[in-house]
Amino acid sequence: VQLQASGGGLVQLGGSLRLSCAVSGSITGIKAMRWYRQAPGKEREWVAGIIPNGSVSYADSVKGRFSISRDRAKKTVFLQMNSLEPGDTAVYFCNVDTPYRTYWGQGTLVTVSS
């Protein structure tokens, strides 16, 4: 199983980006799909999550600006990021949690310039 994250890049203050994370390989029993981020010199932090029934949750720092969604057929999770701020600059990682193990993608860099 591999998770391939994409969509990062350089964006100006107030701009938008859409991250994607595609899951390849055989995977069963997905409990949750999540996005995390790690800013330079900081610990990795949880950003958003979605569970099989479609319920979503967000960190307070991104609530109202970010939106997580998924395409179940394509086993892909998305993170729509609007009103980006310099504090959102980080490497963004996708994460898939199953009863057997947790999988991580390789990360995609988001840089927000002021």
Image (tube, rainbow, N blue to C red):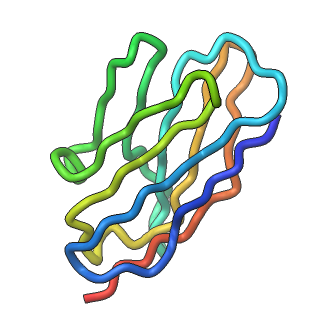
* Residue 10 horizontal side relative to residue 80, left or right: right
Residue 92 percent location from the top left of the image: 51, 58
Q: Residue at x 48, y 49 (%)?
A: 36
Residue 68 percent location from the top left of the image: 37, 39
On-image quarter of the C terminus: bottom left
Q: Residue at x 52, y 67 (%)?
A: 8
Q: Residue furthest bottom?
A: 114
* Residue 65 horizontal side relative to residue 39, left or right: left
Q: Say which quarter of the image contains residue 100.
A: top right
In the rendered view, tell whether residue 113 sits above or below residue 91.
Answer: below
In the rendered view, tell whether residue 4 sits above or below residue 29.
Answer: below
In the rendered view, tell whether residue 26 sits above or below residue 53.
Answer: below
Q: Which residue lies furthest to the left in this view?
A: 64
Q: Residue at x 62, y 59 (%)?
A: 107
Q: Say which quarter of the image contains residue 89.
A: bottom left
* Residue 89 horizontal side relative to residue 100, left or right: left
On-image quarter of the N terminus: top right
Residue 40 percent location from the top left of the image: 48, 75
* Residue 64 horizontal side relative to residue 71, left or right: left
Residue 110 percent location from the top left of the image: 46, 71
Q: Residue at x 20, y 45 (%)?
A: 63
